[in-house]
Amino acid sequence: MKQHIFTGFGFGPIQSGLFAAEAFKSGNFNRIVIAEIDQKLVDAVSANNGSYYVNVASSTGVEAVKVEGMEIFNPSDDTDRAELLKALSQSTEICTSLPSVNFYDSGKNSVASLISESLRNSTAKATIIYTAENNNHAAEILEEKIKQKLGGIPDNVQILNTVIGKMSQVVTDKDEIIQKKLKPIAPGIDRAFLVEEFNKILVTKCKIKNYTPGIKVFIEKEDLLPFEEAKLFGHNAIHALLAYLGANKGYKKMAEMKNDKEVMAIAGNAFINESGAALIKKYKNLGDGLFTEKGYKA
């Protein structure tokens, strides 16, 4: 039975290809609402009956996935802002997916202002707020901004950190869109969302009593910091290493290196025996399978 309402801030590849897409796939949401300040994007998705495409890459190819029934509003427009506040006041799950935590309290219609205003009039039984910015303490930063405006956080509201090891991009080059046979976001928009199929992201454990999130594919952890460090010093650091090595050897794209045994051996060794070894030593007492040599090799 549909009993959830989702509202997301920002309509980039992570919001569209992970949070909104998983909310849609779950079948647990009555409404999926997005706040976006790019009016051209808002108009295009609205004109397409609230439908958009996200291109999902797997090891076997790329599939264009259609997400339907979404509502999208520009908080800079007074009418849209009113609709957005109404949706937020009913939302059981909210996600911020912005370029930086610096945007939380930026401008008259900031994320912190809109969430705070909606929480004053909330009719939701409970609300969790995912922070999808690449920052170890995004949830704490947003919580502090809301506390300053609201005076505190209601007992039935929890702000969660996330660790998102999912590659994604907005493809804007028309030739690349054609070459890769990507489906544009919506008619009238010469942009395409391209994301990998991976969706098992980590989130802070929800501790609101008698509340079950509508998006069920996420993996809850009591303490996210070790996993955030594993992403930053493993996932991200090895991508950086590969980029430096690849540029030095004249490669143009990361994918070109997958058959270069020398480069991949260096990257694998650094991942398992350098950052991996350090993190395994630091967090072995957690008893989590990731922080073992076997876990890192997997």
Image (cartoon, rainbow, N blue to C red):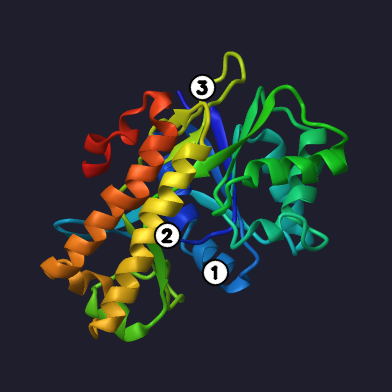
Q: Quadrant of residue 292?
A: top left
Which is nearer the N-term, disc 3 or disc 2?
Answer: 2
Image quarter of the N terminus: top left
Q: Quadrant of residue 103?
A: bottom right
Residue underneath mark 2? 52
Q: Amino acid at mark 2?
A: Tyr
Residue underneath mark 3? 212
What label does residue 41 carry, if any?
1
SS type, badge 1: helix
Q: Is 182 rendered above or below residue 221?
A: below
Residue 121 at x, y percent in the picture? 80, 33
Q: Amino acid at mark 3?
A: Thr
Q: Amino acid at mark 1?
A: Leu
Image quarter of the C terminus: top left
Mark 3, other Cα within 10 Å: few <14 / some 14–19 / many ≥20: some
Residue displayed at 41% across by 30% down: 216
Which marked residue is nearer to the observer: mark 1 or mark 3? 3
Q: Nearer the viewer, residue 88 or 101?
A: 101
Does the residue at mark 3 contact the one at mark 2 (Cβ under 8 Å)?
A: no
Position of 42 compared to 49: left or right? right
Q: Is 222 rendered above or below residue 136?
A: above
Mark 1, other Cα within 10 Å: few <14 / some 14–19 / many ≥20: many
Residue 120, visible in the rendered structure? yes
Q: Nearer the viewer, residue 66 or 47?
A: 66
Mark 2, other Cα within 10 Å: few <14 / some 14–19 / many ≥20: many
Task: Kindly report the distance in space between the C-alpha atoms of the residues bearing marks 2 and 1.
Answer: 10 Å
Residue 5 at x, y percent in the picture? 57, 36
